Image: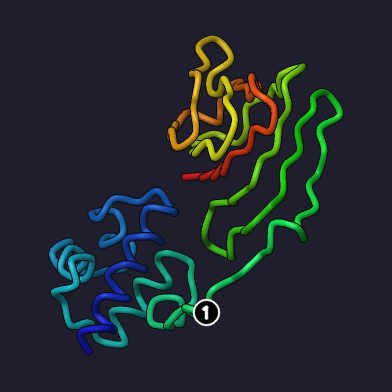
Amino acid sequence: MEELRTRIARTLRREREAAGLSVSELARRAGISKATVSQLESGAGNPSVETLWALGVALDVPFAVLVDQQSSAPTLIRADALVGVPSAAAMYSATLLSASPPGARRDVYLIHAEPGDPRRSDPHHPGTTEHVVLVSGQARIGPVDDPVLLNPGDYLSYAGDAPHVFEATAPGTSAVLISELR
């Protein structure tokens, strides 16, 4: 039962945050106490089927989402099998590594870029945050008005719902980019 409690706690918090709801608002919509929601999210609660069903309805997710064990099987994509989508405006390509499953809002990309024209992006959906880890090369990344020079291993997080840029400043630049929508 302990593993199930942990899974419910993690999933409940993830779905509540994805829906943009406070603990109080979720409790109100589900018709249960705020303390119950807090206990469940901390892994301390022992929910009934009815409580989980009410939470699922309030979150607009199937009951199974709250209790189902997700597959832990690894996903392997070999680098030599990657096919990127090129930019028309810059020496830049993006390869989707992992799309969001239903109910989740994140995509993972592998970026390859060469020096030249920067890749300028218009604002994405409101609430989007981009996370970048530079793998090789060097690049100026982030808000158009204030990009940051990154070196291999550097991590940067910035608002993806504002104009932003990716400009390779060294040959063979690559990065992992995670686009997250809250």
| Image position of 162 with respect to 160: above or below | above
| Image position of 2 with respect to 146: above or below | below
Residue to which mark 1 is pinned = 73
Viewer-side residue, 163 vs 93: 93
Q: Position of residue 108 (x, y in %)?
A: 59, 51
Residue occupying image coordinates x 62% and y 27% = 123
Q: Is residue 133 left or right of residue 108?
A: left
Q: Amino acid at mark 1?
A: Ala
Residue occupying image coordinates x 81% and y 32% = 87
Viewer-side residue, 173 vs 93: 173
Viewer-side residue, 7 vs 112: 112
Which secondary structure, mark 1? loop
Residue count near mark 1 (Cα–Cα under 10 Å), binned few <14, some 14–19, many ≥20? few
Q: Quadrant of residue 155?
A: top left
Residue occupying image coordinates x 20% and y 84% = 2
| Image position of 7 with respect to 34: above or below | below
| Image position of 76 with respect to 131: above or below | below
Give the quadrant of the N terminus.
bottom left
Q: Position of residue 96 (x, y in %)?
A: 69, 52
Q: Is residue 50 left or right of residue 121?
A: left
Colour approach in the figure: rainbow
Q: Quadrant of residue 48?
A: bottom left
Q: Position of residue 81 (x, y in %)?
A: 77, 60
Residue occupying image coordinates x 49% and y 39% = 133
